[in-house]
Amino acid sequence: MNELLILFSNNILPIFLAASGGFLIGKYLQVSPRPISQTAFYIFSPCLIFSLLTTSQLSGADITRMVGFTIVSVLAVGGLTWLLGKLLRFERRLLAAVLLTSMFNNSGNYGLSLNLFAFGETALAYASLYFVTMAVLVYSVGVVIASLGTSSIKDSLAGLLKVPALYAVVLALLFDALELQLPLFLDRTVSLLGDAAIPVLMVLMGIQLGHAQWEGQTLALTLSNVMRLVAAPAIALALGAVFGLQGFARQAAIIESATPTAVVTTVLATEYNVEPSFVSTVVFVSTLISPVTVTPLLAYLGA
């Protein structure tokens, strides 16, 4: 028990303390999350993705394995969640919200920090690649799912063209392929904005948690949290062996998969009006109870 308490206090508690500032200003100063979410959506996140993609030092095999693992694990969670949601007869908008909160995890401000604290710089490099892949999925598959709550597949796919993070990915890959570099003043600007993404999302998480409203959707809330905190890491443990992940790569991949619901889902839910109150509640609950599932997993992985 003492070991678990030490793991929690050294690796998870700092994340909660950092987010508490956002919670307090959201709760008592009535700060609106929407302007902050829009800033993160259109400026900070694209810059962070571009920076991570253009500075990664991992080999091609490392990148392929981690990207493949991330895509398959997210789609596996999504497929199982969709099937269960259909069996439970969730209406279209609620099912979209449950998919968002089950599939997409807090691999950025929670996962990156946790991997750094628990396993060090090498694990952080693998975790960063997981995060970049997750970000691409969020701003592609996630946007389609969110917009499907209110629009057709055709309109949802067209909406992808309005997502700046996707252009950041394309531009970063182009820069890597052609071995290009930004002028120093632009590189520093992008780095500054990218570095701001994680603390901004952390504060946004706290603000959203302060605005969380319970709407009595117990079944949907339970399904989202079970899929995110129990099923997702279980699937990750199985897929880690399939993709041949070992050492720091395995540790980073499994811990990233076990993190609570992504703060960015509140951004998508707010942006596309897909049960934002429910989504923020899932973020709150999954974040609050995540130490119960993540801390033993840290011990199992040898943190």
Image (spheres, rainbow, N blue to C red):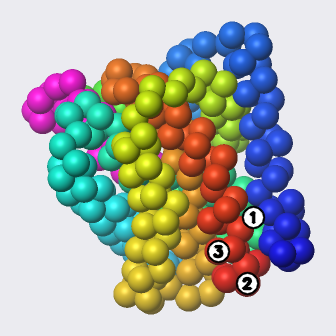
Q: What residue do we see at 86% from left, 62% from top? A: 10
The residue range painted magenta reads: 133-158
Task: Say which label, 3 or 1, has the lower sequence index.
Answer: 1
Q: Are marks 3 and 2 in contact (CB under 8 Å)?
A: no
Separation of residues labelled 3 and 2 (CA atoms) = 9 Å
- Image coordinates for residue 236, horizontal then vertical, percent: 45, 74
Residue 116's tag is: 1
Callout 1, which amino acid?
Leu
Pick the front one: 124 or 16: 16
Locate residue 77 relative to residue 229 in the image: left or right: left
Q: Which mark is residue 302?
A: 2
Q: Nearer the viewer, mark 3 or mark 1?
A: 3
Amino acid under disc 3 = Leu
Categorize mark 3 by other alpha carbons within 10 Å: few (<14), some (14-19), many (20+).
Answer: some
Q: Is residue 119 above or below residue 266?
A: below
Q: Is residue 145 magenta?
A: yes
Label 2: element kind: loop
